[in-house]
Amino acid sequence: MKIKVLKDVLKANDTIAEENRTILRKKGILTLNLMSSPGAGKTLILEKTVERLKKDFKIGVIEGDVSTSNDARRLARYDIPVIQINTDSIGGACHLDANMVKEALGSLNLSSIQILFIENIGNLICPAGFDLGEDKKIIVLSLTEGEDKPVKYPVAFRKADLLLVNKLDLLNHLDIDLELLLKNSRKVNPDLKSIQLSARTGEGIDKWAQWIKKNLDLKKRRSGALGS
Ligand code: MG
Ligand code: ZN
């Protein structure tokens, strides 16, 4: 019975995720779901990304954390719409689900957003199991976490469309084998593209910004072809 309950929960989640996806498609919003363990640097990456893209694109952010609105405050400084989801009062869930995102979408003016970032709750395991209605899943892994994480926590890497390897500025200070890390990520997901960057120094942010622009273009062209 336990298994059935879990299946029902995931099925209900998938239904709402599809509703989210339909809404976001109609508005032509590129939605990116960022997943990582705590402290990998998602928020700083977003700060640098918003800094880079905000003059050309309208950006919104949904922030997921168990508690506090620290990260939402950091992003709100860029004068963009930011919604903070805290799960502490609803059982302290360690991942975002489609229903939470649906609620957040309801509080955003979607007509004034072209790129929506969802910063998932820091956790390398269950965020990967919950479709939110996003276009792409981005997995962030920092060099301080070690090269074996893709093989230890394969699901998130398997489901991801892009790997951002963060904290590149620390490469020469750590006993980390970057080639092995990339090899491990390809072992669980041979198609996984990766971009190496340092949110701290800004190195690689351009390449990541290009990836976002390319995917926004693709989405526009595709929804144009669908006539919506
Ligand atoms: Mg954060
Ligand atoms: Zn969870």
Image: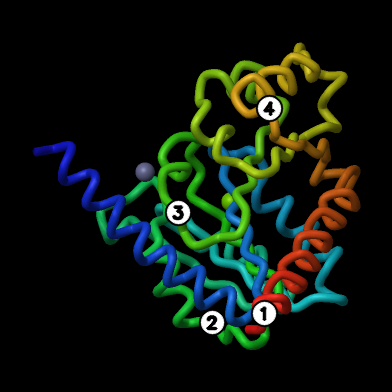
Please, is residue 211 above or below residue 59 in the view? above
The colouring scheme, among rainbow, by chain, secondary structure or one colour, is rainbow
Q: Which residue is mark 1?
A: 113
Location of residue 18 (image quadrant): bottom left
Q: Dot 1, crowdedness within 10 Å: few (<14), some or many (≥20)?
A: many
Q: Is mark 4 within 8 Å of ligand 2?
A: no
Which of the marked residues, 4 or 3, is nearer the chain's N terminus?
Answer: 3
Q: Residues within 10 Å of mark 3 (few under 14, many from 20)?
A: many
Numbered label attached to residue 26: none
Give the residue at mark 4: 190
Residue at point 61%, 81% (across, down): 27
CA neighbours of label 4 inside 10 A, class few (<14), some (14 to 19), many (20+): few
Type of residue at label 4?
Pro
Q: Amino acid at mark 3?
A: Asp
The local secondary structure at tag 3 comes to: loop
**Amino acid type, label 2:** Leu
Whether tag 4 and tag 3 are in contact, CB under 8 A, the answer is: no
Viewer-nearest of labels 2 and 3?
A: 3
Left or right for 100, reference 161: left
